[in-house]
Image (tube, rainbow, N blue to C red):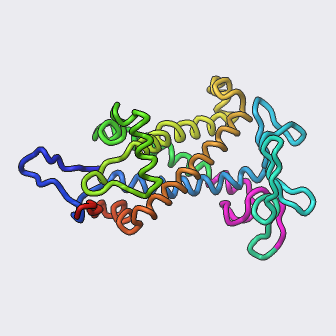
């Protein structure tokens, strides 16, 4: 993200209504490829989950072991169990109809998975291929960010931004849909910084490491991963929770795009050009 320095006499600081450069080409390419990658991995991951729709903590897990999460069907009712809590989800999870109206007893419905018809082998092919895309993108993004100092300049919070009063002020502003205007709209606010840093340096490394921990071949080469995550089943649970974190991030991100003005926001991520929201005194 490029922000003109108003201290330079040769540059006139942009105002609300001006069309300015917002995102570099590398950022835009990374964003769209990464968006496709995450969606494919989430949907293929749900199909893999359908093969054994139960999650455990520890080294082992099988049908008769105690699961902390279970999605399935009992009789004519779809259910989700989280610990001792039982939630009826008939028609959505556990028990639903496919595109031809045939009743299916699987955790996630056909429209949420890749492929749409049950195939563990195909789902693994999709998932593993795009996992390598995610790893490659992550390494490339980290290298480019070190060179152009994007993380240090744009994402690392300043000390004053981490003050609870400042964070609470931004939360209240977002709740009231009072988004930054003018040149301030070019900078990430503290909530954006914390969200992006959590994904880049929290969720992505964690989902990659837990994914590797579920591989027997990797376990043989790097047995310390099993100790790090407390066993393969614990790694599977953490992997699932990371995927849920990605899904939540995407939902909030899309909601903010819609509320802030989808045409302007999407255009900036396609062309790099962004029209600054007008200041309230304009």
Name of the residue lying farthest toward the right: 75
Residue 217 coordinates in the image, percent (x, y): 67, 33
Q: Is residue 12 visible?
A: yes
Give residue 66's position: percent from left, percent from top. 85, 37
Whether the magenta-drawn stretch holds residue 104 is answered as: yes
Left or right: where does residue 12 sit relative to residue 80? left
Q: Quadrant of residue 264?
A: bottom left
For image coordinates 28% across by 51% down, the residue present is 184
Please check the rendered image and state whether residue 184 is part of the magenta-colored stretch, yes or no: no
Which quadrant of the rendered structure holds the C terminus?
bottom left
Q: Could you tell me which residue is drawn at 75 percent across and 33 percent down?
A: 57
Decide: is 43 above or below 217. Answer: below
At 51% across and 47% down in the image, what residue appears? Answer: 134
Q: Relative to 227, does residue 245 appear above or below in the rendering?
A: below
Tell me which residue sits at (79%, 66%) in the image: 91
Marks counted in the figure total: 0
Judge left or right: residue 191 versus residue 63: left
Q: Which residues are magenta?
A: 102-126
Query: x%, y% of residue 14?
Result: 18, 57
Residue 23 visible at all: no
| Quarter of the view holding residue 56 | top right
Q: Is residue 20 left or right of residue 131?
A: left
Residue 70 location (% of width, % of height): 80, 47
Q: Residue furthest bottom?
A: 100
Residue found at the very far left of the displayed protein: 9
Q: Nearer the viewer, residue 112 or 173?
A: 173
Residue 21 higher or lower than 142, as above or below:
below
């Amino acid at each position: 993200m490029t922000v003109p320095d108003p201290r330079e006499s040769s540059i006139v600081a942009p105002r609300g209504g001006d069309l300015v450069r917002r995102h570099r080409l590398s950022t835009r390419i990374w964003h769209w490829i990464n968006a496709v990658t995450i969606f494919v991995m989430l949907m293929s991951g749900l199909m893999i989950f359908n093969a054994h729709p139960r999650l455990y903590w520890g080294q082992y897990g099988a049908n008769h072991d105690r699961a902390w999460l279970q999605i399935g069907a009992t009789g004519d009712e779809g259910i989700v169990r989280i610990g001792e809590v039982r939630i009826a989800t008939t028609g959505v999870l556990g028990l639903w109809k496919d595109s031809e109206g045939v009743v299916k007893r699987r955790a996630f419905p056909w429209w949420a998975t890749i492929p749409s018809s049950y195939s563990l082998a195909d789902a693994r092919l999709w998932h593993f291929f795009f996992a390598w895309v995610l790893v490659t993108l992550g390494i490339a993004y980290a290298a480019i960010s070190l060179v152009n100092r994007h993380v240090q300049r744009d994402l690392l919070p300043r000390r004053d931004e981490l003050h609870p009063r400042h964070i609470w002020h931004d939360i209240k502003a977002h709740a009231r849909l009072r988004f930054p205007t003018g040149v301030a709209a070019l900078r990430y606010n503290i909530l954006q910084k914390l969200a992006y840093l959590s994904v880049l340096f929290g969720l992505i490394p964690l989902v990659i490491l837990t994914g590797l921990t579920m591989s027997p071949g990797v376990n043989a080469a790097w047995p310390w991963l099993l100790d790090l995550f407390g066993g393969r089943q614990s790694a599977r649970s953490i992997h699932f929770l990371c995927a849920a974190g990605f899904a939540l991030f995407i939902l909030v991100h899309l909601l903010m795009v819609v509320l802030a003005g989808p045409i302007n926001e999407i255009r900036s991520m396609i062309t790099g050009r962004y029209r600054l929201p007008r200041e309230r005194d304009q």
